[in-house]
Image (cartoon, rainbow, N blue to C red):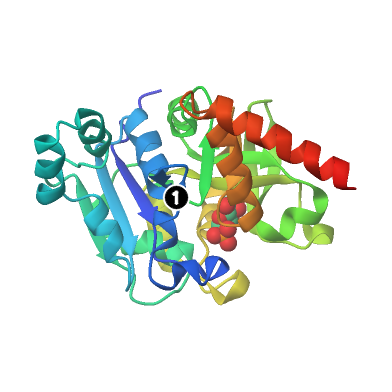
Amino acid sequence: MRVRKITKAVFPVAGLGTRFLPATKSIPKEILTLVDRPLIQYAIDEARAAGIKEFIFVTSRGKSALEDYFDQAPELESELRRKGKTDLLEALKETNMDSGAIAYVRQNRPLGLGHAVWCARRLIGREPFAVLLPDDVIAGERPCLLQMIEAHAETGGCVVAAMEVAPEQTSSYGILDISEDMGRIVRARGLVEKPLPKDAPSTLAVIGRYILTPRVLVNLNRIRQGAGGEIQLTDALAIEAKSKAGVFGMRFQGQRFDCGSKIGFLQATVAFGLSRPDLSDEFGAFLHDLMAMQKAAQ
Ligand code: G1P
């Protein structure tokens, strides 16, 4: 099957991040830091590793720290150069974007994820594209988005990252209605946004990575407000699931952390801290002692 190469990715970053107040009163939640890098850097790195060349941010008021983060910092850089801090200069390099590689569009009203993606339509044009929700951080040997681009090449349809969740958690996710289960990949006959457990068609949940065909943008034009009064990407995908090209869920390899929640953020901090060669020994020993102290106090 011949499919077009995917080079554009949309990052919806307009959310208020109220779950992390007061921290997010003055900084975007995407700048919250896992070890020493902001959440957004993990999503950008994953996209780059999957071959993405154009990065489209859907932003809102109060997100200028994000724009600055991806800009050059001439004073800081010359200061580091003067002091011979080559390792830090190297670390800064990953935040640099080629001229014109990054674009910002504003979502002027919080009308939901579907609306955020629709706001980027003119920059996407008529080609398949990726969407990454930076709240979902996925650790693994192979970048999740790369696995999805491969699944798109196999199926030719839209692909969503999918993961089994506990039955009582369906109301936090888009849930797939599976028509054919091929193991790693499933075909969906529909999708439902945040159903109550009793209404959920399965326990296979959508995680924040999508490969979308341009028809989804057309579908977004057609749909009305759905769950939570928002324009839901899930509803536009549900229309697409009825088409010949279809929508597929891909059970990705890797560990997903829900960094949109406090517990998920803490779990990610511990896991990423322990996976860093420069920190793991000391941090691991600290956690070990802390657990022992807690046990002794019980
Ligand atoms: C969004 C989507 C939902 C998906 C989830 C994954 O919800 O609407 O379908 O399952 O991301 O993280 P949110 O968590 O932004 O409410």
- Tell whether 197 sits left or right of 172: right
> x, y percentage for residue 122?
24, 58
Which of 258 and 73 lies nearest the eye of the viewer?
A: 73
> x, y percentage for residue 252?
58, 31
- Tell whether 6 sits left or right of 157: left
> x, y percentage for residue 277?
48, 23
Quarter holding the N terminus is top left
> Is the residue marked by circle 1 packed among few (<14), some (14-19), or many (20+) residues within 10 Å?
some
Instruction: Place residue 294 in its image quadrant.
Output: top right
Decide if residue 211 is in sight here: yes
Instruction: Place residue 181 in its image quadrant.
Output: top right
Which of 34 and 101 lies nearest the eye of the viewer?
A: 34
Q: In the rendered view, would you say 111 is above or below 220?
A: below
- Tell whether 163 sits left or right of 223: right
Name the residue carrying label 1.
Answer: 33
The residue depicted at 72 percent of the width and 35 percent of the height is: 289
Residue at mark 1: C-beta within 8 A of ligand 1: no
Judged from this view, the residue extending furthest toward the right is 298
Q: In the rendered view, would you say 259 is above or below 226?
A: above
The residue depicted at 66 percent of the width and 53 percent of the height is: 263
> x, y percentage for residue 285?
65, 29
What residue type is disc 1 on? Thr
Ligand 1: image quarter: bottom right
